[in-house]
Amino acid sequence: MATKSIKIKNAVKVILLPVFVYLLFFICSGGKFGKPASLIMNLKQSLAPTLISFAMCCNMLCDRMDLSAGAVVMLSAMFGAKMVYLHGIGLVTFAVLVVGTGIVLGTVSGIMYRLLRVPAIVTALGVCMVYETLSNLASISWVTAIKGETTTLGRFPYCLIIFAVMFALFYIIFNYTKFGYNVRACASSQQIAKNGGVNTKRTAFLCYVISSVFLGVAALLKISIQGSIDTPMYMSSTNIIFNCMLGIYVGLALEQYCNLLIGIFIGNFVLNMLTTGLLSLGLSASLQDTASGIFLLVIMIFTYNNQRVMDFISSRKEKKEYAKLNA
């Protein structure tokens, strides 16, 4: 019973975060924010970023920053869209091409990391610039769009089904496989994991390979939901992954209350609500970035220090009761 009670309390704490953000913007916007259609759109727009967060998660836990992830997503989506434009391919072929391209590109990133033997962030920057150049060569115009049948997978319920399958797949990989165990061991300490028999180089390469699968599916969902993809220039593809990184950090903060994967999804959903909420208040782009940063900082501080806050409140309460008894 005690365990069940703790689980319920933890679930309530996790749910309180999106509820708090919703109520805050609903009140501040005078009811403009938070309509059912808007929430459904927020949910849809959270699916691809969550998959990108899953793709980056294992590398980030092991202190490897894959800045090429955004470029992989954009180039994969753009290549599929160009094939639709040039050859009029159908939905199935389009989906296979986008996901397959993501797998190839992500795996190449892993191979480059293994071969070059330089810090992951250096390799990622180089690969990112190469992929952005290829995206420019593959682009039809500044915005590459698809329409009609090829956007089917971005509609309900197909996008949710794809997301649910990928969520379940990553949940199994991360929690119930030797690879997941090795990643968590490396996240604690690379050297201790290596001394314990973990092949850290092989684990690192597998992180890129598994990441590539989720990046490919994320690219498919992203262009299917949006209907278009911008041509990346001057490292603009990194804008995609920075928000996804924030989703991971929120997930890590919530991990004490729920599974990391659920926390990452909640984090990305809250970030999308935050963007929509700030738009409903009519803030400019620069003020939105400032407000988002401050808001997330407050959330992270409270989440990581909430036990201290609760202890402080409890201590103050006990002191007041003690003072009353002695009065």
Image (tube, rainbow, N blue to C red):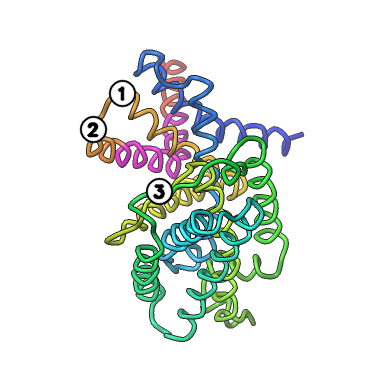
The kind of secondary structure element at disc 3 is helix
The kind of secondary structure element at disc 2 is loop
Residue 263's x, y, as percent? 55, 44
What is the C-alpha distance between the residues marked 2 and 1?
Answer: 9 Å
Residue 142's x, y, as percent? 33, 52
Farthest-out residue, right:
1
Q: Which residue is mark 1?
A: 281
- The image quadrant that residue 294 belongs to is top left
Q: Earlier in the sequence, mark 2 or mark 3?
A: 3
Q: Residue at x 32, y 38 (%)?
A: 292
Mark 2 or 3, which is nearer the eye? Answer: 2
Instruction: Please name the amino acid that badge 3 sits on.
Output: Asn
Please determine whether, in this image, residue 289 is positioned above or below residue 322: below
Q: Residues within 10 Å of mark 2 (few under 14, many from 20)?
A: few
Q: Which residue is mark 2?
A: 284
Q: Which residues are magenta?
A: 292-315
Q: Quadrant of the C terminus?
A: top left
Which one is nearer the viewer's eye here, 199 or 272? 272
Q: Which residue is mark 3?
A: 243
What is the C-alpha distance between the residues marked 2 and 3?
Answer: 18 Å
Instruction: Please name the amino acid that badge 1 sits on.
Output: Leu
The kind of secondary structure element at disc 1 is loop
**Are the residues tagged 1 and 3 within 8 Å (C-beta)?**
no
Farthest-out residue, front:
87
Q: Is residue 303 magenta?
A: yes
Please determine whether, in this image, residue 25 is positioned above or below residue 3: above
